[in-house]
Amino acid sequence: MARGETAKKPGEAPRSLEQEAFLSLQRTADLIARAAEEAIQRSGLSGTQYNVLRILRGAGPSGLCCREVAERMITRDPDITRLLDRLEKRGLIARARDSKDRRIITVRITREGLRILAELDEPIEEFHRRQLGHLGQRRLKRLIELLNSARVT
């Protein structure tokens, strides 16, 4: 076996360690994302909607402009405006144009958005404990370090 290759299954092309790691990350992310989506959907939110509300709660009362929300998303949504439209229609966020620069629209979470997030906090924490708690603090910290390193290119 060549340096950097892993054992292959019958009928499968040889893979490098990098490709093996990539595929393992993808499988793990998909598994965790699907389970998280189920927990979040009980509140009538999608994963991306939950992410926006979480971002806006963290931003505090000053809110963020639309571009900043888009930049902080876990997964990029090509149509952030439509996503925000849906949340605003449900009364979970509010948008306001800047009085000095009308091009800037500030987005803030509403009381209702905060209420829904508060209801989700404990179930999401429990979900995280079930999915990753068995790794222990030392291994979780190492995993975070490794993932952070992988994102630096």
Image (spheres, rainbow, N blue to C red):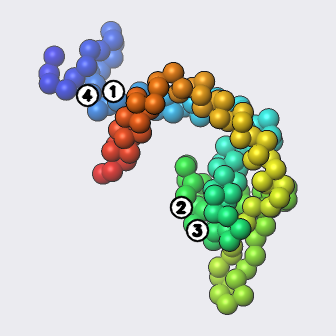
- Would you say residue 76 is visible in this rendering? yes
Rendered position, 14 above or below 119:
above
Mark 2 or 1, nearer chain start: 1
Identify which amino acid the numbered label 2 is placed on. Answer: Glu
Q: Of helix, strand and loop, which one carries label 3? A: helix
Marks 1 and 3 close (CB-CB < 8 Å): no
Question: Do callouts 4 and 1 mark residues in contact (Cβ within 8 Å)?
Answer: yes
**Residue where numbered disc 3 is placed:** 67
What amino acid type should be assigned to the residue bearing mark 3?
Arg
Mark 4 vs mark 3, CA separation in Å: 38 Å
Q: Which residue is mark 1?
A: 20
Q: Mark 4: few, some, or many residues within 10 Å (few <14, many ≥20)? A: some
Instruction: State the separation of the CA atoms marked 1 and 3.
Output: 35 Å
Q: Where residue 51 sits: x, y (%)?
A: 64, 50
Rounded to the nearest angstrom, the CA distance separating label 2 from label 3 is 6 Å
Which quarter shows the N terminus? top left
Q: Picture coordinates of residue 148 (x, y %)? A: 38, 45
**Label 4 or label 2, whichever comes before in sequence order:** 4
Q: Amino acid at mark 1?
A: Glu
Which residue corresponds to mark 2?
A: 71
